[in-house]
Amino acid sequence: MLQVGLLGAGRIGQVHAGNIAGHKDSVLAAVSDVNTAAAEALAREHGTSARSTEDILGNDSIDAVLIATSTDTHSDLIEAATAAGKAVLCEKPVDLSLSRARACLATAEATGQPVMVGLNRRFDPNFANLKAALDAGDVGKPELLSITSYDPAPPPVAYIKVSGGLFRDMMIHDFDMAAFIMGAAPVRVHAVGSAIVDPEIGTAGDVDTAVVTLTYDDGRIAVIKNSRRAAYGYDQRVELLGSEGLLQATNVLENTVVKSTAAGVSSAKPEHFFLERYRRAYAIEWNAFVEAVPNGRALPVTLQDGINALAVAEAATTSAETGQPVEVET
Amino acid sequence: MLQVGLLGAGRIGQVHAGNIAGHKDSVLAAVSDVNTAAAEALAREHGTSARSTEDILGNDSIDAVLIATSTDTHSDLIEAATAAGKAVLCEKPVDLSLSRARACLATAEATGQPVMVGLNRRFDPNFANLKAALDAGDVGKPELLSITSYDPAPPPVAYIKVSGGLFRDMMIHDFDMAAFIMGAAPVRVHAVGSAIVDPEIGTAGDVDTAVVTLTYDDGRIAVIKNSRRAAYGYDQRVELLGSEGLLQATNVLENTVVKSTAAGVSSAKPEHFFLERYRRAYAIEWNAFVEAVPNGRALPVTLQDGINALAVAEAATTSAETGQPVEVET
Amino acid sequence: MLQVGLLGAGRIGQVHAGNIAGHKDSVLAAVSDVNTAAAEALAREHGTSARSTEDILGNDSIDAVLIATSTDTHSDLIEAATAAGKAVLCEKPVDLSLSRARACLATAEATGQPVMVGLNRRFDPNFANLKAALDAGDVGKPELLSITSYDPAPPPVAYIKVSGGLFRDMMIHDFDMAAFIMGAAPVRVHAVGSAIVDPEIGTAGDVDTAVVTLTYDDGRIAVIKNSRRAAYGYDQRVELLGSEGLLQATNVLENTVVKSTAAGVSSAKPEHFFLERYRRAYAIEWNAFVEAVPNGRALPVTLQDGINALAVAEAATTSAETGQPVEVET
Amino acid sequence: MLQVGLLGAGRIGQVHAGNIAGHKDSVLAAVSDVNTAAAEALAREHGTSARSTEDILGNDSIDAVLIATSTDTHSDLIEAATAAGKAVLCEKPVDLSLSRARACLATAEATGQPVMVGLNRRFDPNFANLKAALDAGDVGKPELLSITSYDPAPPPVAYIKVSGGLFRDMMIHDFDMAAFIMGAAPVRVHAVGSAIVDPEIGTAGDVDTAVVTLTYDDGRIAVIKNSRRAAYGYDQRVELLGSEGLLQATNVLENTVVKSTAAGVSSAKPEHFFLERYRRAYAIEWNAFVEAVPNGRALPVTLQDGINALAVAEAATTSAETGQPVEVET
């Protein structure tokens, strides 16, 4: 049984707590949060105890930590946890600063501890199935990838201001999805963005609607569309044109009911947001971590993967600001 | 916390064990099975103990039992458990004999204990959503109901022989679904059936393909189609024509990936069988039981509902044998 | 060039006029109608002339007639036209009386002239494709056929009174579709019907909602559902369960636009009624006639086919009246 | 009756010939082609005569010409036909040279004759319905437009060499679709392209796979994806994210049959290529021309629209070559 300390008892921490506690091979040994009450409530719900982060990292009976704290603490906690001999699963993004993330990678690697980054969409059964079909040769060689990723509604502007911007905060998932599907990093990024959903977002220096084109050294192309608002819910689609066909992973609907009346034919909306759409993905992600760590097997998503996505996000941010295509540092 | 004894550690008992143990307001207190090894394995998996059925019924700290044993034991166990002061959730069908089931109802009712029958499909989110849309008046008054229910493959002929026949064993779910949607019992039943999937099933005195027409006293009509075999998996669909439109609950697919090639456009198959398709329904069913019992609230599916479905099954069996429509005893 | 006289300038006659005039191998030589003004208007539109039916039948330069007059004239006109040496395409149904239709068949056959009945749905590209897939063995042997056929709204009660009833007037298309798909006539028919759409239809002695079960001598089963009203338009679907899979021909939608908003996801309705849905089918039907007649090739739908559908309709009418299954006379 | 001369008897000329001859208010008065035999065959099929282009333009009884010749003759023929007092419908593109097209516009405008450009996709009922829904405010204000347009297979390299390149030859339709939907011209264009379908296309100086991002002065964005090859046929989709929802116009399938077997669930492919997919669009386009010209009404697509699309194509070509975003000259 993997003894796990959970750092962070917020919305996403709660999802992870359920998965850790519900997995047959892991135990939720302790929870910490700067908000002590939140840590205690979550600990109580799962019959475990709230501790300080220091206690958790210092406790030799704890094998692994799951980092679900605010982004600005990720690098420090990865370094501290690996130094303390823990295996780590850290929420994305690794850091808002690419150089800081790279330093973290160097420090963590020196400890030899396994670190996985929570790029959860790779574990969505639909996207995973698309990837498997591609790998099986179902549509030949990949040529043109399209990712559509719209949130139901923008976050508060206060959040936007500390988020690192749309490319680092939101599209980073799509940059990783592109890496997952294409199996390579792009060489060049072109981004355009606007604040047309909410001018306040523009005033805060960010965009809410963006299109990014990635080009690969072998001529393949990927295009990613993001919007902070989709009135109908969370829109999460991937499609890949290959030399022998097209693969599409479409939205997961809330139910299968179709209603036909004089007003038209209507069906259910997509599952509302990431907690609903990716509930299974989070569980599968946790299972992947639990199966790999005790056996010393390779993790399916690494700290390097998180840094690769961040590097593309940084290039996209520059491209959107300058209006010029940007080469990706790798 | 509801202390629950599980009677029966087979395939469906295992599903229930997970739901009982995983629910925040119930505890899996003990498991019994005629196959002691099976009971012990299941108990061990959930950190509880295997006991005899007698021990479970005699244990005052146990509040409720879930009966997931073979059909021929259901009536006896419902009577014994209610006599022992337990609330009961019993798998369908109540009994293969309508008169025995009615006697069981009388005996159980005399104890005052709540008894729910596991007609799980009412809890499928898709069918429940269809019912809610109907009740909300989305398609006006119901007129014509169609239920399609095909299994992926026929069970062994040995099972067929003790099953009570297709109408009592398989279509009973659909008879209950008709009652759930239409909110009434039919007055007349006409059934036709054939053994065209497997002639051995015919030799065993049963059918594997059947169409049943139900008529209601107000002129509404329902039609149910069953087959023991669908090469593409478990086909579970409901559609209702109302005075102002149509409601359809279609199959749940394994994933959302669509592949387009020179060979055509293909998508995933329906979830394979009842354990996959109704996994969520079983959990929601258990939650409904746990929420109702300790609070003395009405159960959403009663022993009477189970008996009503059985009465229609009996009429259908007679109709298929005689070729004549049969009035339903109510 | 096939010289064609059109008898009947009503709604369906106008559709045929366009197809006759638009086909490269046929000419609309004359039009007749008891409503002379209607005949003249239609003739003028296609640059031809209005004549009496007698003139058309007596004109040796006319090779074929298309009978699109009221049902009560069909048998007489088939007899007169074949006696006059014309090839005939007659709208369905052949007659409301099965015995009169059979007498007509005998008389027409004696002339040696080819007679086709306008069971147009066989020519719908979707149903034709389903039939071709079945014949190609795509789903193995057929076992259970389902036909859904709902009109957008009931006709006037005055029409209902002279229509011969739902089974002869409306479901006759579905009886022929069953014959087309199953390649055989049923041995037994069970019908239930209600007047729940409009009680006036019940007062007129007819039903507006009906379910018919057909059984075949080899154990195959077909079920047909009809309603005179579907608030969302014309619902025309066929599905066939075979030993190795399922074939479904679904509705043709008015367009492919899908709209997703906070209110849900909506798409276009089915094409509104038979003139829209079967526009292509009528053109393909006419082409089949034009290709067969001058070359003496077998017609794809014969007078016998029309009579077979009528025989099933008669049995269904009796079954709905008596409540008993009825053997089909063949 | 509009008397129409058709210039060009090739594949697309044949489609137009059928629409001209089949329309109740137009007559196919003459056909010309540099291939005299082709002109004669097409004329014969429609019962008209083959003439030289000079004869057609000099014939005072001819009111309009449809130009369906090779692209390099378009500007000259538009000028000659308008000078001769004919109304003109000219196939796209107006010219491969933007400056030549602009000169043509000036010359044609001076004659006062109406000139329409055959940007047929605006008349596709699906795209037209999407546009109407947008204009009706169904999804609020447009924000992000996506157009997917893949051909089934690349044309011969010999054609590629004289085509003006993918952006002028193929994506020009999508540039016009963007103008149609967005109701404005973009201010900036970024294009990336590769020759990954066929390296020979690259050797010929063109690309076969491309992604173009258009930005508008108010912050709206459009992205267009083109590929010269889609193994599954002609892929033609438009989707628009608005402030209150999403509109999607998906592919038109060859039929509605769905087949479910052990191998999966499959449906028909999209209609194969433009002649099938846009057959109705061509007829509706012709009808729009015939309804507008004799009544002096404004044409729905003008020569200026054709030039606008060409201006974007030129900017995209430059962007793909230089790797830099390009401002659109307007």
Image (cartoon, coloured by chain):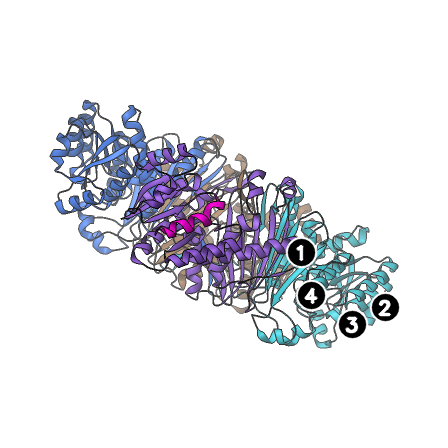
Chain colours: A cyan, B brown, C blue, D purple
The Cα atoms of the two marked residues, 4 and 2, are separated by 39 Å
Q: Which residue is mark 3?
A: A51
- For badge 2, the amino acid type reads Gly
- Please report whichever mark, 2 or 3, sits nearer to the chain's N-terminal start: 3
Q: What is the chain letter for disc 3?
A: A
Specify the quadrant that holds the N terminus of chain A: bottom right
Q: Is residue C117 above or below residue A203?
A: above
Q: Are marks 1 and 2 in contact (CB under 8 Å)?
A: no
Q: Which residue is mark 4?
A: A317
Q: Which residue is mark 1?
A: D323
Which residues lie in the magenta part?
D70-87
| Residue D82: x %, y % from top left | 38, 52
Q: Is residue D282 above or below residue B57?
A: above
Secondary element type, mark 4: helix
Camera-side residue of C328 and B257:
B257
Residue D64 shows in this picture: yes
- For badge 1, the amino acid type reads Gly
- For badge 4, the amino acid type reads Thr
Specify the quadrant that holds the C terminus of chain A: bottom right
Mark in front: 4 vs 2: 4
Q: Which residue is mark 2?
A: A58
